[in-house]
Image (cartoon, rainbow, N blue to C red):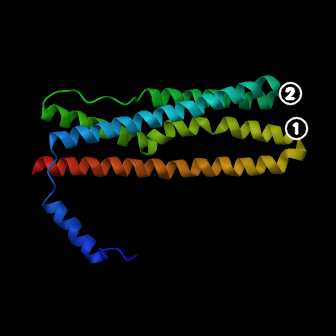
Amino acid sequence: MRSDYLPDDLKRLWKELASNPVRISPDDLRREARKLWAGVRLRNWFVVGVCCIIIAAYGVFFFASKTALERIGSVLSIAGAANVIVQFLKRPARTMPDFAAIECIRFYRAELQRQRDFHRGRGVGSWLLPLLPGPIIFNVAFALDRPMFAPLVKLQMAGFLMAAAIVVPLNLRLARKYQRRLDALDAAQNQ
């Protein structure tokens, strides 16, 4: 099915919205803030849950491992997952205060900026980079100690690195989404 808007029409619509932004009512602002709060809360608890599974699994691997390199990889994996938990729980979803409209706008803007900055380059690096070495070291040690599993470990490592490579663009996309919300809020407020 063809789109109702052609590319030129989309450009014209974008320019019209830039010159005549839509006003945001206090109820819309509260609804958007609640959506942001619910999304951040769900994301944080999902990440914490996955990290708890990683910690439990590498805890078992630590005690079951035979080599020192596997144990070092397990400890680094546990430390990396714990770092992710700390990074995400340091940025919990905050509920919107029940103040005047101007205070709600300030709060919503501050929350959008906080989430945008968390998903930008340095924010992603603060939790993703410390997570990577542990599983890599563990898997290399596992493959060296058990050569028959080396092809499976290679496949697992490729999947792990691909997932890590996908996480960065997804986070940058979220940062752009938060920036667009900030721009729309600024445009609505300046009108």
In this orientation, which residue lies closer to the viewer: 89 or 100? 100
Image-quadrant location for residue 140: top right
Q: Which residue is mark 2?
A: 66
Q: With 32 as the anchor, is 164 left or right in this view? A: right
- How far across and how far down the image is residue 65, in percent? 82, 28
Q: Is residue 43 above or below residue 21?
A: above
- How far across and how far down the image is residue 44, in percent? 47, 33
Q: With 16 as the anchor, is 120 left or right in this view? A: right
Farthest residue to the front: give it: 1
Identify the residue at image location x=18%, y=48%.
186
Q: Is residue 172 above or below residue 122?
A: below
Identify the residue at image location x=13%, y=35%.
102
CA separation in Å, label 1 and label 2: 9 Å
Q: Label 2 sits on what residue type?
A: Lys
In this orientation, which residue lies closer to the viewer: 134 or 188? 188
- How far across and how far down the image is residue 11, in percent? 25, 71
Under circle 1, the secondary element is helix
Q: Are marks 1 and 2 in contact (CB under 8 Å)?
A: yes
Q: Which residue is mark 1?
A: 145
> Quadrant location of the N terminus?
bottom left
Identify the residue at image location x=45%, y=35%.
42
- How far across and how far down the image is residue 176, in percent? 36, 51
Farthest residue to the left: give it: 191
In this orientation, which residue lies closer to the viewer: 132 or 98? 98
Q: Label 1 sits on what residue type?
A: Asp
